[in-house]
Image (cartoon, rainbow, N blue to C red):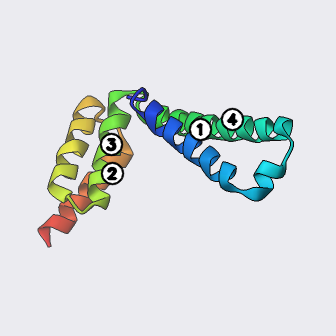
Amino acid sequence: MYLPLAAVVAAVVLGAYGLLQRSERFRATPAALRREVCVGLVAMAAAGLGVTTFARNTVYRDEVAFWSDVASLLARQRRYGEAMEHYRTALRLKPDFPQAAESLHRLEQMSNR
């Protein structure tokens, strides 16, 4: 899933470097400092992607968390019928999952209005 993002990250880093190259101040900066700035940009991009990966992995830790996350996303998009199906799937996998039960109940009440 993350391999296709390598091209996007490379494009962003190269684009940022290209913008920096156009800057008079950047070109007037010593070469060693320019290298450090570029390394810093790459490090910031890697750190940002690492944090996002870590956060996303908490959702994929098990099937129940995954289905609940998908249902929550669908509910935010007002796709309530699909969200309810996914909450039901989460509850089939883990019947004692209170957040999914509460969310499903709330969506069912909304759809009965």
Mark pair 1, 2: CA separation: 21 Å
Give the structural element (helix, strand or loop) at label 4: helix
Above/below status of 27 relative to 50? below
Q: Which residue is mark 4?
A: 43
Q: Nearer the viewer, residue 26 or 98?
A: 26
Inspect the image, locate mark 3, and give the three-letter code of the amino acid beneath it: Ser
- Give the residue pinned by disc 1: 51
* Other residues around mark 4 within 10 Å, as few (<14) / some (14–19) / many (≥20): few
The tag on residue 68 is: 3
Q: Quadrant of residue 33?
A: top right
Mark 1 or mark 2: whose residue is earlier in sequence = 1
Q: Residues within 10 Å of mark 2 (few under 14, many from 20)?
A: many
Residue 60: x and y in percent read 40, 31
Residue at 25% in and 52% down: 104
Q: Measuring 32% from the left and 46% from the top, which residue is drawn there?
A: 100
Where does residue 98 sit, x and y in percent of width and height? 37, 45
- Determine whether, in the image, residue 103 is placed left or right of residue 81: right
**Kind of element beneath mark 3:** helix
Q: Is residue 102 left or right of residue 14?
A: left
Label 2 to label 4, Cα distance in Å? 32 Å
Q: CA distance from mark 3 to mark 2?
A: 6 Å
Q: Amino acid at mark 1?
A: Val
Q: Mark 2 = which residue?
A: 72
Q: Amino acid at mark 4?
A: Ala
**Quarter of the N terminus within the rendering:** top left
